[in-house]
Amino acid sequence: MDGWIAISIFGAVFGIWITRKSYVRLQLSKAKHPSLAGHSRMAKRVARLIPYYSFNKNSFFQVDGAPDNIASLREIGFMRLSQIYQERFKKSVSLTNQAAETISDLQFTGRYRVPFQFSNFVSKHLKSGSFMQSSSGVTMTDLDGNTFYDLTGSYGVNVLGIDFYKRAIEEGAKRVSELGPVLGFYHPIVADNVKRLKALSKLDEVSFHMSGTEAVMQAVRLARYHTKRSHVVRFNGAYHGWWEDVQPGIGNPLPPRETYTLKEADQDTLRVLRNRKDIACVLVNPLQAMNLNKGAPGDSSLLDSSRKAHYDRAFYTKWLQELREVCSEKGIILIFDEVFVGFRLAQGGAQEYFGVRADMVTYGKTLGGGLPIGVVCGRSDLMKRFREEKPADICFARGTFNSHPYVMGAMQIFLEQLETPAVKKIYENLDQVWDQRAKNLNDQLISMDLPVRVVNMSSIWTVYFNEPSRYNWMFQYYLKEQGLALSWIGTGRFIFSLNYTDSDMQVVHDRFIAAAQSMKQDAWWWNEVSLSNKAIKFQIIKEMLFRKNPRLQASTS
């Protein structure tokens, strides 16, 4: 009898345990984004199924079913651009072609500037140079003497302007020249930089690394070490470098391990954080406030006009406050990855801008005075890499170029500049200035019936299109014709340095409008009533199926 009672009790306890475990697992499933991006293993499987196919000249101009007269206008416009590119960018393109034979990065970026179906034809006729000769103010000059307004921001490095960083590197090198490139020992400048970083981050300790990716790696590693938990939470679409744990899915040859990719700004995610016991830390990239739960908006994925962006500072602030509260309640380390936004939004970074304090913050490109750097700032209890009571239990992290004297010198110049009255004045009404600049452009786009809009998060902008089209990726080539320099991801992200004046912006504004007018005149934005984003996606699926099974196409012809 006693045995049956014990079995019954065990069965009841086991039933409660399995029910609880199933409930927690169901919560995790609900907190994942319903898109493929939210299910990394499935995304990798789907990616392997997508076949390669390419449009030739006969089909290139009519993939959306455009009539012959529209296709003719497009072809004329395309070949006009091609001729301009050949004449204007000859030296830059020649060196790029030569270098691409042995520089794998150029091979990759050259192939993924546009959707792959169009890439072969475009790369033959609209060759784009990847070399620049000089820079000044807010412009760059290529090998052929063409001057471009810089909309790349050097991938976010350029906060205070090209000329400032030239001076920072030069002056910083002078400050450390007596020590030179001696590694292992610290130059005294390091102590001053730490003092300033502590004041800006409002955190206790600092460690230096060689890149933003490395800084994030160390922050996550320390969080796991001190919480004795395994998993990191990242949000769908967010970028935190190219190492395995924070880049699940497409682009990573390994499957995700101790990583949960969840929906950002969602109550399902907060429920997971409250109920799981294995979460060491949560990574937040504030840049995602522009496009929650979506990947980086590059033109290689601009298949239709479904790219959207929206920025609501109050909404995102509320989300971060809720996240902060849950992390504090459950002992989860909240990490702000400010490698990209850095000190672009406010003098004290995203923590100051949103009014939410993280447990650890990572910085990178914006902090190095123009040179490469990674930095972790954190609470003293989280930054310690060993346990007093267990001397063999350590969290190792070192690097040959950590605290490189020349990087530290340029960083000191940058940190000093942040404290000057002139720079403080820039931050006083930063959002208002950039919001108004974006509004001015949008107002004119609307008044001229051009199907293009911009969305901004301060000086970071993205472009979206409000009429269905399969050719929006062409816009980057019209912008370049007008003398606007974009990074290889195209119209997905413009990054303006804060030294852009109103007159500089007016030039960019006028050239942007001219590019849009030209693209419209060349009929790339033609569409008929039946053309919708849904119809475009369906057409692309059909193209892939026909490529996989040509007999299927023959049977439907």
Image: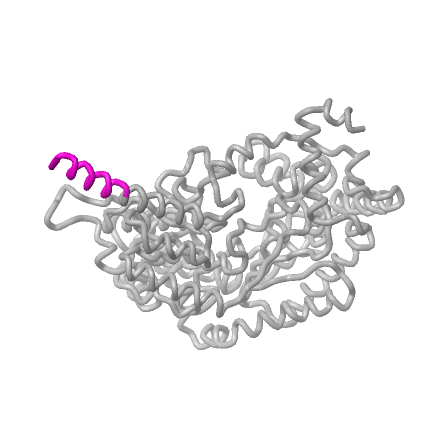
Query: Nearest the camera: 479 or 393?
Result: 393
Q: Position of residue 524 (x, y in %)?
A: 78, 49
Q: Residue furthest right?
A: 69
| Magenta span main SS | helix
Q: Is residue 556 left or right of residue 245?
A: right
Tell me residue 318's x, y (percent): 44, 67
Instruction: Decide whether residue 14 is among the magenta residues.
Output: yes
Q: Residue at x 61, y 56 (%)?
A: 308
Count of numbered marks = 0
Q: Position of residue 305 (x, y in %)?
A: 68, 51
Q: Quadrant of the C terminus?
A: top right
Name the side, left or right, on which 14 lies relative to 260: left
Look at the image and give the residue range highlighted in magenta. Answer: 1-15
- Which residue shows up at 65% across the image and 42% down it? 114
Residue at position x 18%, y 36% in the image: 7
Q: Determine the residue located farthest toward the front in the rendered image.
A: 1
Residue 92 seen:
no
* Residue 509 visible within the image: yes
Q: Quadrant of the N terminus?
A: top left
Position of 88 compared to 194: left or right? right
Task: Tell me which corner region of the image, top left, top right, bottom left or bottom right, holds residue 71.
Answer: top right
Q: In the drawing, does residue 329 fall left or right of residue 341?
A: left
Which sits in the foreground, 548 or 14? 14
Q: Residue at x 27, y 57 (%)?
A: 331
Magenta residue check for 415: no
User: What scheme was used to colour the molecule?
Assistant: one colour
Whether 455 is drawn above or below 216: the answer is below
Location of residue 136 in the rendering, given as x and y in whole percent from the top left corner: 58, 60
Which residue is more in the foreground, 130 or 322?
Answer: 322
